[in-house]
Image (tube, helix red, strand yellow):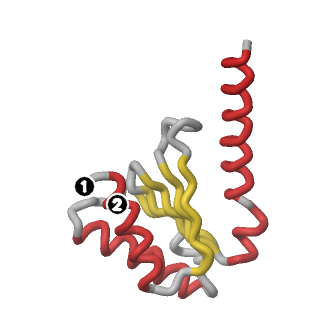
Amino acid sequence: MQIDDLIKLVEDALDEMKAKDVVRIDVHELTSVTDYMIIASGTSNRHVGSLSDNVVEKAKAAGRQPLGVEGKESGEWVLVDLGDIVVHVMQPATRQFYDLERLWQSAESRRAQQQQSESAE
């Protein structure tokens, strides 16, 4: 399965279950762990669990076995590791507290500035 197909599968699975505020961040130049992070919010513990379950179910149906699922027991933050994509499904308060978008997008901005500086030298 190509990465673009996997991204679409994940985003469709989240949309199907009415995930809130879905964001995709390209991190392939920032880490060797994954290429993309997809972050979404659920409205309750149950919704977070249902969103992550749907991502796992759709991935398995497409022949992509998740490498791991963490946090399902609490329902505050569930991480689904699909290798090329790591999916974070969180309740809004948890998402705001950890602010992964700012963390990773800031790192991306710093890397771009560093590359511009190096090319100017």
Q: Amino acid at mark 2?
A: Leu
Tag 2, which secondary structure?
A: helix
Instruction: Give me the residue at 66% from left, 42% from top.
Output: 108
Instruction: Tell how many labels.
Output: 2
Instruction: Give me the residue at 72% from left, 70% from top.
Output: 94
Q: Amino acid at mark 1?
A: Met
**Which mark is first along the chain, 2 or 1?**
1
Mark 1 touching mark 2, by CB under 8 A? yes
Residue annotated with mark 1:
1
Instruction: Give me the residue at 38% from left, 66% from top.
Output: 8
Residue annotated with mark 2:
6
Camera-nearest residue between 11 and 66: 11
Q: Give the image location of residue 30, x and y in percent.
A: 58, 37
Q: Residue furthest top?
A: 121
- Which of the labelled discs sits on residue 46, or is there none? none
Question: As displayed, is residue 39 above or below residue 58?
Answer: above
